[in-house]
Each structure stands twice: as C-alpha cells, then as structure tokens.
Image (cartoon, rainbow, N blue to C red):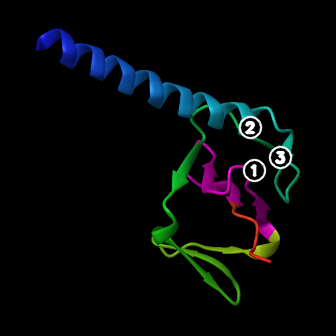
Amino acid sequence: MRVMIAILLALELAGALSIAHAHDSWISHGGHRNTAGEWCCGEGDCSALPSEHVRVTPDGYLLDDGELVPFAEAQPSPDGAYWRCRRADGTRRRFFAPPPNS
C-alpha cells in the first residue's frame, strides 16, 4: 500500500512539474515585452489566475485584489489562461488573457 501511495505521489509531482515547465517555456522563451518595453518573464515571475478571479469590464480586466488591467496592457495567452507576471517589488510586469471569443 505504501509503495502504491509513493508511486501515485511521484506521478502527481511529475505532472505538476511538467505543467510548470510548459508555463516556463512559453512565457520565458516567448520574447514577450510589456508596454514599457521590458522583457517578460523569468521562471517564478508568473502565476496563473483562475478565471473566477478575473472579471472583464468595459475598462479592462478587474482582478480579485482590485487591480484593473487595461485591455491595452494585456497580451493574448497562448494557453488560453490568465497569467499575471510580477517584478521583484510585486508590481505587475505583464498580464496574459485568453483571446476574446469571436
């Protein structure tokens, strides 16, 4: 039983690492720049935001913490998820959003 649990935990960890690597590969290797011209982003700079934590308003994307990301400052997300990337001081460096529905 313990061996089976260890195997299941190892498989779960491998899956989580592959997701993190996929994120790292498209964000950090995508040559993305924000509106200030800064390159984006390195490993650990970005985190996924569940769609229920983001509201689309007439002015942009309103995040649960009250931050408003204007549409002009958002970049299409290749994986269809919301991602917020931050600088070391916690300010937003880049925001990725799913492409709008046609």
Question: Closer to the observer: label 3 or label 2?
Answer: 2
- State the image coordinates of residue 98 (x, y, percent, origin top left): 69, 63
**Quadrant where the image shows the N terminus:** top left
Residue carrying label 3? 38
- In the picture, measured across the screen, residue 64 lies left or right of residue 61, that is left
Q: Identify the residue at image location x=77%, y=75%.
A: 71
Residue 62, placed above or below residue 90: below
Q: Tell me whether the residue at label 2 lies in contact with that at label 1, contact meaning CB atoms closer than 8 angstroms.
A: yes
- Residue interval drawn in magenta: 73-96
Q: Which residue is drawn at 61% across and 55% down?
A: 84
Q: Which of marks 2 and 1 is nearer the N terminus?
A: 2
SS at mark 3?
loop
User: Which residue extends farthest bottom?
Assistant: 58
Q: Is residue 78 above or below residue 62?
A: above
Q: Nearer the viewer, mark 3 or mark 1?
A: 1
Q: Does the magenta stretch include residue 83?
A: yes
Residue 94 image point, x, y percent: 71, 54
Q: Residue sitting at 37 percent across and 27 percent down?
A: 12
- Mark 2 sits on what residue? 26
Tell me the residue that label 1 is attached to: 78
Q: Does the magenta stretch include residue 32?
A: no
